Amino acid sequence: MSIILSALAFLILLTLLVMIHEVGHFLAARKMGVKVEEFGFGLPPRVKTLFWQGGTRFSFNWIPFGGFVRLQGEASTTEKQRTAKGSFGSVPVGARILILIAGVVMNFLFALLIFAIGFSVGRWIPTYLSYEEMEAARAHGDISYEPAVIIDAVVPDGEASRAAVPVPSILLSVDGTTVADPASVPELQKGKQVVLYALLTGKKFAERRTMVVPVREGKTGVSLGFYPKDLQAPRRGPVDALRLSLREAGVLVVQNVKGVGVLFRSLLVSLRVPAGITGIVGIARYTHASVQEGWMVYLQLMAQLSLSLAILNILPIPALDGGRLLFVLIEAVQRRPLNRKFEAVTNTVGFALLLLLILVITYHDVLRLF
């Protein structure tokens, strides 16, 4: 039953995010006077026409993921087709830019809406990239926690490993001295041995353990880090929720852009997809995990993917919104239309490369399953 529920959640996730994106293009095109020839639920081939409205065919298609919008003249290869009334190329450059970025804007706004709900109703914890950021947030009242030290690794065959120091665990004290900062631990490890008192994490019932660990050259062979114990968020009003939503979106946008750079650099250097970059298989796995955790976690994944979809589509890659936007901007700068056949071929090649990239990422996703 859980697999069926996860599969349904996965289908809803992908379809909703893509449809929100396409609704953005649809509304902007209608507003700018461009005829929308078809609004498709799912991907071709077409099963049936659901209805016609305002000259637009609303269709249901065989492939159940996502959807599409087909604008009049968007794939035209002649100047006559391009400039025909109601065609995409017949409207001013500014109108075309608005149509192209409308999908990205809709995905961004949708993510902000979910974040605002999560930060107010769900009391979500924002993404922090450093200890200093968390301390500043705690001082501001965005979160609350008790500073602690976590043992996140031990040196193989080291003193801590031989003493069976558990990983991960929260280090409570060293030789009877309570610790709350990793930087304070080395000063407490000056004898021939130390007594580590730790709280095991990830267990249903708290378990404390005392370990005597020899010290070699001032080290016990443990890797320590900062840990926010009892991390919680207060109930937030609309203003604070919106502020944190904008901050969260900004952090994730930067991470997504950096991730794209890491992906292409890794592919060029080693033909490998780096850890943390995932495709359709990985998204399915994350969806299943989020459904098991609860619907607020599922909503958080939806918001994160909505932002990722926005970033991906705005990249200046042919066949994506960003690539088409680049062509429009070039046309605006040189003040004359681009060669339509060249544009069509470039988009076709770009689409083929995009499919190849998806296949490569999916291949690595599958490898990670085993």
Image (cartoon, rainbow, N blue to C red):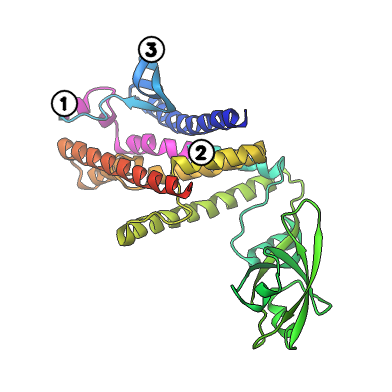
Q: Nearer the viewer, residue 28 or 193?
A: 193
Amino acid under label 3? Thr
Amino acid under label 2? Ala
Position of residue 112 measured from the top left corner of the image (x, y, whole percent): 57, 42
Q: Residues within 10 Å of mark 3 (few under 14, many from 20)?
A: few
User: Where, quadrant-wise, is the N terminus in this rendering?
Assistant: top right
Q: Residue furthest right?
A: 176
Q: Quadrant of residue 31?
A: top left
Residue 250 higher or lower than 74, as above or below = below
Residue at 81% x, 64% y is 208
Measured in 3D between alpha carbons, the distance from the residue under mark 2 to the one under mark 1, in whole angstroms, is 45 Å
Which residue position is annotated with label 1?
80
Q: Tell me which label, 3 or 2, sits earlier in the chain.
A: 3
Position of residue 308 measured from the top left corner of the image (x, y, whole percent): 47, 45
Depth-wise, is mark 1 or mark 3 nearer the camera?
Answer: 3
Depth-wise, is mark 3 or mark 2 nearer the camera?
Answer: 2
Position of residue 340 measured from the top left corner of the image (x, y, whole percent): 17, 36
Q: Secondary structure at mark 1?
A: helix
Depth-wise, is mark 2 or mark 1 nearer the camera?
Answer: 2
* Figure label count: 3
Q: Can residue 325 be seen in this snapshot? A: no
Q: Secondary structure at mark 2?
A: helix
Q: Tell me which label, 1 or 3, sits earlier in the chain.
A: 3
Q: Are marks 3 and 2 in contact (CB under 8 Å)?
A: no
Q: Nearer the viewer, residue 83 or 308?
A: 308
Q: Residues within 10 Å of mark 1 (few under 14, many from 20)?
A: few
Q: Can residue 345 be seen in this snapshot? A: yes
Which residue position is annotated with label 3?
49
Amino acid under label 1? Lys
In screen coordinates, is 222 left or right of 66? right
Which residue position is annotated with label 2?
284
Which segment is the magenta one?
79-106
